[in-house]
Amino acid sequence: MRITIIDARDVRREHLAKLARQVTKDVNPVPFGTKISQDIPSPDLVLLHVGVYQEDNGDVIADLLDRFQPHSWILCYYGGEPVEAATRCTSLAVAVFPAPVDQDDPGPDLARTIHKVLSMLPERSSLPEGSFRSVVTGFDILLEAKLDVLTSVLCNITPLADHLAELRKIYPQAFGDEGELLVPQEDLLQSVADLRKLFFNETSQVGDA
Amino acid sequence: MHVELLDDCRLPWQGVNPFATPPVPDDNLDLWFWHWAQARLHSRVDPLPGEGLFLINAHGRFARGAHRQDLQGVEVLKHIRLTPWLGSARGWHAIVYSLEPLDDILSRKPGDLVLKSRGVTFLRLPSALQLRNALINVYPRKKWASLNLMEILSDLARNDSAAPNERSFRPYVASDYTPPDSAHETSNLWGLYEMWPTSLAQKFPEVDAPGDLPTDVLAFVLSLNSKKARWLEGERTRHADTTTKKTMELLRTACKDKRIIFVDDEAERGWAQFLRLLLNQPGADGANCILWTPDPATLVGLRRALTSKDRHAALIKELAAQIREQKPDLVILDLRLCGSAEFTAPPAQSSGMELARVLRASELFLPILLFTASNKAETLQISHSHNIDEYWMKPGLGEHRGLGSREADITSLANKIEYLVGADYAWLQRMALDLSAINAAAPDTWWWERSIKWPNPARNDRRPISKLADPIRQAIMSQPARVDVRIAVVELLLPMIDAFRISLRLERRDSNEAEPPTPELLRAGIFNQLGKLVELIHGFTDGSGIPEEFQSAGTVGGRKDTEDNAFVFFRRDWCAFRFFAQRNEWSHVRMIDQNNPFAVIVSKKVSGPSKENTVAAMSDAMAWLTVPRVDAVPQEVIGRDDQRFQLSLGDWLPAGQRDWTRLTSRAAAARAFRECMSRRPEYEPLIAKADDLKKSYRKATKH
């Protein structure tokens, strides 16, 4: 696995490099002001500082994201505030660590997340979409699907197709042969309660608060 | 019973028809809440009543781009509990419903512990839609079975409301609170909010006058984290009392037509706006003080250059040059101009201190006020060592809260600015201008660099002074030119003026420095320097052939004539003699006594020369050095003949005083010398300039 670290803060960059070297030898901490050659192979993972300080020191975050996201996962982090290019990036290959990070020490939370990413994502090509973001930000796409689908049913609106698709993979028994969600309308509340029990793995009765 | 619904979904509630505001999505939940709360508070159709309860979807999506799992409904509940301007609705009972189990929520987000606080009922969907049954299920001990839904809700609202003002609520806030970061940025915004003039007049300017607040300050005060901070730290009372208003009036009068420089990386976040409000009269035509701030790009460049010492130093010099071009009356500097990027740097190495050093190197007497969020003693000590004139701590949160009220903070700032643009420093700048003129002028342009011939010394009975041989008489009568005197004059004047500046700062210091020099001691040193100036200009240039008794008589002194006990003055400069007499008074500390008209008496104890008399002496000295003297030509004067350059027995002696030696020191009394000088035409322009300098100081001290 190849890891590239782009961070203008020298001390923090070296900390992260040390962390990454526990897993792989191919770690490239890019010193501040160094241009990364276009000829080198794309890394599997980029640890990218997306704070305002990085741009103040000459890097253009949007350009870096455009360059690396087709072939690499990009784990972004920041100290003060993240630049907009990172927070508004919709690519599933890009995830922003949700909490600010100290300027010298990445801290145990970011270190744990990096370890998780490194252990769960050995190779770029084998990663399922959405998993990277979920690991980095804590966003649970399955939970979101459950909540959205149940709410939509209660409000009598059509759930998002992506969410239905996610749930169908795990709870095929809740779906009909044609892929429709099975929610008998005779007693809507009971049907949704049963579905809820299934999704949240509960054994309690409907009346429970 | 009023039921207020907070949800983006149209759930099929049974038995209740809650009041729902149409959701207006906003990018930011804090802003969304502000808009919602204001709309509800100010609604003409159906404002929030005194009693009611909330129905909140824990998974409501209120801000644009939100996800159900973000639990924004719980964040809204926190907003409700922590928003003081929400009135009684703040404590309304809240029924929070969710599809997710409570345990799952708390395990994902432990900071949502507020769901277990008093005044909150947690219900699961879909059973919550049958609200009556769901509530009876949750509260099995309450005798609700016989009540209808509205009666149950009324009972809940009345008997189970939240108490967000009580200490018992503290754990629910503290467990979810991230204190302001060490960068002081959020702390500064909070201090700015509390000091904003609107904040002094209105309790909640973010509701009553949001347009008055700077954008960054408004965004900060609306944020949930700042509400938590405010709750945890407690309210700080604010009101514009009479003292504050009077202080503001005095400040604005003092700042009229002044030019003040303000350098701070947070200037555009509200600080520059705040200072302009402070320094200028309200109203469109109220601007009377110019506040100059550098281009924000300059400070961004400075921050970027932190990794390169040479580049950083060059940018600091450029910024100092821009400041000098403005010809300011006062410079206000933030300690850390590069913000969080230099928080680990010691104060002495911060950009603000570096800029102060560069400015001070060329602008010796320009008043500098340091702004900082640091209240560390180390910063205060370092600011003194860098000749910063004043120091003001930006109030904020946590350790930067300060001990006093916000009015006290504003009053302190106003007093410091008023002082720094006031009489003392304005007069100091005049001294500095004269000093520059002496330094920069062409050689041989000063009277003390030219030969001066003094009239023949004589006695009032016209007898020659005994034992005064011709060579000695010649030496006494002429003062040869010395073009090298100018550098020496500047070298003496500079520390005098600097000592005065430091004495001003020491008078206002509020630190407990160990045995610092007192202002009085510094002022005594100034008088010593005056004596050296006189010796420099009027000293004997050639001691050969002059009897020792003449040499030891002093440069503007004389000796007693042994025949008739007259005291003969060799150098005929009454102004200089006056300085020398004052110098004798203060350099020899044992001579200080309570009869000395220059003494500062504190608790019946003489402590040193007063500031006013020091100003007078320095004004006289600068006038003496800068006003061109005409050659001393004997002229008719009002009064007895031949009294111009003589002091004979009986002259100038106060009634009953017979001893000339004692009178020498007593003759330092301004009145006696003033009379001598007023009889001589060559002193007229000197007296006029000296009076002007003194008047410029006295005039400005009057309010």
Image (cartoon, rainbow, N blue to C red):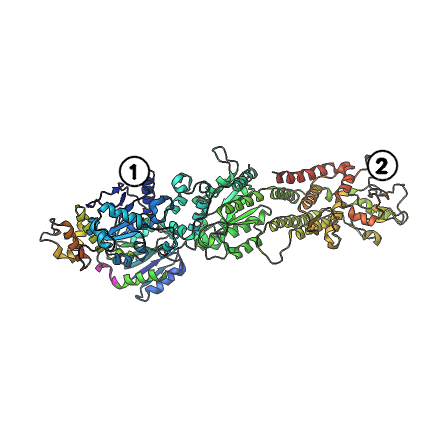
Q: Which mark is residue B46?
A: 1
Q: What is the crowding at mark 1: few (fewer than 14 residues within 10 Å), some, or many (at least 20)?
A: few
Q: Which is nearer the N-term, disc 1 or disc 2? A: 1
Residue found at x 16% / y 46%: A156
Task: Name the chain letter of the residue that bears numbered label 2.
Answer: B
Residue at the farthest left position: A177
Three-letter amino acid code at the position of disc 2: Arg
Give the quadrant of residue A76: bottom left
Where is mark 2, residue-wise? B640
Residue A114: x and y in percent read 31, 61
Q: Is residue B65 left or right of residue B577?
A: left
Task: Classify mark 1: helix, strand or loop.
Answer: loop
Quarter of the image with the N terminus of chain B is top left
* Residue B297 within the magenta-colored segment of the rendering: no
- What segment carries the magenta color? A120-128
Q: Is residue B496 left or right of residue A22?
A: right
Three-letter amino acid code at the position of disc 1: Asp
Residue B506: x and y in percent read 61, 51
